[in-house]
Amino acid sequence: MGFSIRLIAISVLMLAIPTDVFADGPNRISIRVVDEQGEPVADASVVARYQQIIHQNGKEFRVPMELAAPQTTNADGRCELLLYDVSWTLAAVHALRAELKTEEIMEMVDDAPTDPLAREEFLRALYERGRRFSSAYHLLTLEAKGEPLITLQMAKAIKVTGRVQVNGKPLAKAFVTIGSQPTAIDQLYSRWAPELTDHEGKFAYYSVPGDLDRARIVVERADGNRFLNLNDIRSKTTSAGLDFQFDTKAKDFTREGKL
């Protein structure tokens, strides 16, 4: 009886382990991450994903999946990825480096001034720095396994600010997404996250560099969301980054459906 139980337990464990674990040695690719000047970037997070096509109930779903265990670059800006033994036609590598680590932010908060006004200004500046980042994307080819070294050159995120008005009045608590023409990368990584407007209809965040000529504004309502898609939008270049001013009309917002 004991032997049977152990045999069943082992069988269950074998089924629970992904099949790629038993594949022949994983494919190794070397990654080097550099900044805009070509200098190595240490402590950058490197993630590889591929697109898996899943068929369910007669429908086809394209799902981003992990292609390798995430890695962090060393002092020379390098790391190695061990690709899982899976089939893919679309895959990419993403490198991300925040200006400040979480540990650094916590230490700086502990050292913040005690004077209320000075502390508020200090924390505001720290919050701003905490949102800044640099990133890079690289599409993989089926021949990537044979490449001796893949270099990802990072670009600093752009600060995006703006204001949304409807019929001349600020639109508060609306989700604003500003981005560029979708590419293959967007099927693997969500590069354009929505930002919520404040009571004055204003928003501010850091965005991946790009054309940034498309916008989507979503207003959530109990009876169904309202949205507005805009193409070929224009921005004003400021000392901080890009500023967008949306003067919209209620009739232009389309009902998306009931919640």
Image (cartoon, rainbow, N blue to C red):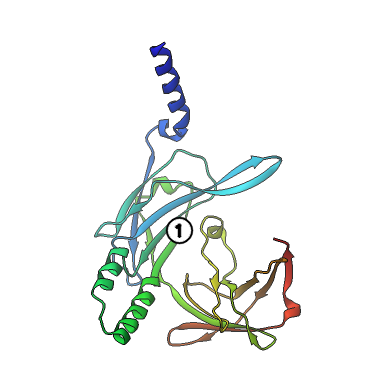
Residue 227 coordinates in the image, percent (x, y): 68, 71
Relative to residue 24, is residue 110 drawn left or right?
Answer: left
Residue 4 coordinates in the image, percent (x, y): 43, 13
Relative to residue 253, is residue 118 drawn left or right?
Answer: left
In the image, residue 124 above or below residue 93: below
Relative to residue 138, is residue 164 drawn left or right?
Answer: right
Q: Image point 59% across, 79% down: which residue?
A: 172
Number of marks drawn: 1
Element under label 1? strand
In the image, residue 161 above or below residue 26: below
The residue under label 1 is which amino acid type? Answer: His
Q: Image point 39% across, 60% down: which residue?
A: 95
Q: In the picture, residue 111 is in which quadrant?
A: bottom left
Relative to residue 178, is residue 29 drawn left or right?
Answer: left
Asked if one can make out residue 41 in the rendered structure from this viewpoint, the answer is no
Q: Image point 68% across, 73% down: which residue?
A: 228
Q: Residues within 10 Å of mark 1 (few under 14, many from 20)?
A: some
Which residue was labeled with disc 1?
138
The residue sitting at the right extreme is 251
Asked if one can make out residue 13 in the rendered structure from this viewpoint, the answer is yes
Q: In the picture, residue 41 is in which quadrant?
A: bottom left
| Along the line of sight, the residue nearer the viewer: 62 or 123 | 123
Residue 98 coordinates in the image, percent (x, y): 36, 67
Residue 210 coordinates in the image, percent (x, y): 51, 72
In the image, residue 66 above or below residue 107: above
Location of the C terminus by quadrant is bottom right
Location of the N terminus by quadrant is top left
